[in-house]
Image (spheres, helix red, strand yellow):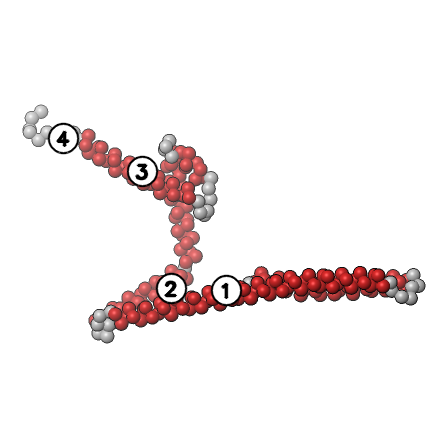
Amino acid sequence: MRRLAKDAQKWVELRSILQDQVRGAKEFVTDYCQYFNANNTPEDLQSVIEEFEQNTNTRIGQLDQTSRDLLQIEFAWASITETRISTRLGQNVMLLTYALWAIPNINEGSTRNPFIITSVIVGLVTLLIAFNLEKLLGSIGQVYNYWRTKVIEDMRSDKNWKEKGERLEDLNPTWKNPSEWWLFEYMAYKGTGLLTGRRRNKREQPKLNTGGTC
C-alpha cells in the first residue's frame, strides 16, 4: 500500500511536470515567432503541443486510476484480514472464558490463587520473550553457527560424509536449504555408531575368572 501511495503521488508530480513542459513549449513557440517578426503562431505547432498534452495527460490518468483501483483492492483485503483476525481473537477470548468457567472450584481460593499466579507468571515470561526476541534469536543463531561449524569439521574428517561436509561449508547457514538436515542426519549417524560400538565392546569384553584359579 505504501508503494501504491507513492505511485499515486508520482502521477500528481508528473502532471505538474507536464504542465510546465507544455507551458515552456508554448512560450518557446511564441518567442520564436516574435523573434522572426511573425505575428501569428503556427496552428500546426499549437495542435502538436495540445495533442502531446492531451495524450500524455490521458496516459497519466489511466495509470493514476490503476493505482487507485489497486489501492482499493488492498484496502478491502486488509479490512477482510483485520476482520478475520478480530473474529479469531473474539473466539479465542470466548474459549478462554469457557475454559475458566470449566475449571472446577475456580471460585475457591485454593484453586483461584494458584491459577492467578500461574497466569501472571506465564504472561510476564511471554512479554519478556517478546520484548527480547531479537536478542534471543541472535544468541540462538550464534550458538547454532558454532555447533554447525563443529559438526561440519567432524563430517569432513569422515570419509563417508566428507563430500556433504564440504558442500555445507559453502552454504550460508541463514539460507533455508534442505541440505541443512544433513547435520542432524550426521548426528544421528554418529550417535548410532557410538551406541553400536559400546554394545560391541561389551560383547567382546572378556569375562572375569571367578573360580580362584590361574
Question: Gap between marks 4 and 2, in whole Å?
Answer: 59 Å
In the rendered image, the residue lying farthest to the left is 212
The residue singled out by tag 4 in the image is: 207
Point 31% across, 38% down: residue: 190
* Disc number for residue 127: 2
Question: Gap between marks 3 and 4, in whole Å?
Answer: 28 Å
User: Element type at marker 1?
Assistant: helix
Q: Are marks 3 and 4 in contact (CB under 8 Å)?
A: no
Question: Gap between marks 2 and 3, in whole Å?
Answer: 39 Å
Disc nearer the start of the sequence (4/2): 2
104 or 186: nearer the viewer:
104
Question: Gap between marks 2 and 1, in whole Å?
Answer: 30 Å
Looking at the rendering, in which quadrant would you find the N terminus?
Answer: bottom right
Q: Is residue 10 visible?
A: no
Question: Gap between marks 4 and 1, in whole Å?
Answer: 76 Å
Q: Residues within 10 Å of mark 2 (few under 14, many from 20)?
A: few
| For discs 2 and 1, the disc positioned in front in the rendered view | 1
The residue singled out by tag 3 in the image is: 190
The residue singled out by tag 1 in the image is: 77
Identify residue type, mark 3: Lys
Q: Are marks 4 and 2 in contact (CB under 8 Å)?
A: no
In this picture, residue 187 sits left or right of residue 134 = left
Q: Are marks 2 and 3 in contact (CB under 8 Å)?
A: no
